[in-house]
Image (cartoon, rainbow, N blue to C red):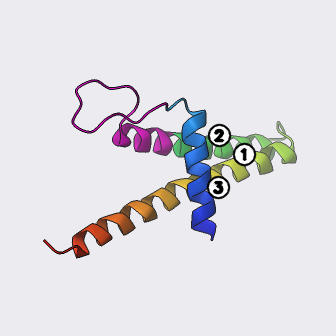
Amino acid sequence: MITALAAAKAYANSGAMGVGSIGSLGGSEKKGLDFGDLLKASMEGATKASKIAEHKIADQVAGKAELVDVVTAISSAEASLETVMSVRDQVISAYQEIMRMPI
């Protein structure tokens, strides 16, 4: 159930990132990001969220940030990581299903 929720969040976030259409198969004209670019953007977003959380933790230790900001940053980083892991799990599952198909 958690992976389905994370996958739904990933789909919703892809719309928020401005991904209109992923593009047509075999077409030379791109109308949006391809799947690789979508994954790269997701990974960069997760990395950025974790770096922000690390900086907030350091700021809080130094007395420059509120605890609420730290908790919010950590929650955001955790949600991003869960989304990336959910997408990874779904890609692996799809690959394994394709490999089981008879030729």
Amino acid found under the numbered disc labelled 1: Ala
Q: Which residues are magenta?
A: 20-44
Name the residue tied to disc 1: 73
Q: Position of residue 50 (x, y in %)?
A: 60, 47
Q: Earlier in the sequence, mark 3 or mark 1?
A: 1
Q: Secondary structure at mark 3?
A: helix
* Residue contact between numbered discs 3 and 1, judged by CB atoms under 8 Å: no
State the CA–CA distance, disc 3 to disc 2: 12 Å
Mark 1 Cα shell of 10 Å, populated few (<14), some (14-19), many (≥20): many
Q: Position of residue 4 (x, y in %)?
A: 58, 64
Q: Quadrant of residue 78?
A: bottom right
Q: Quadrant of the C terminus?
A: bottom left
Residue 24 among magenta residues: yes
Name the residue tied to disc 2: 52
Report the residue at 57% width, 66% height from top: 3
> Which of the labelled discs sits on residue 78, or is there none?
3
State the CA–CA distance, disc 1 to disc 2: 7 Å
Q: Earlier in the sequence, mark 3 or mark 2?
A: 2
Q: Secondary structure at mark 2?
A: helix
Q: Position of residue 99 (x, y in %)?
A: 23, 71
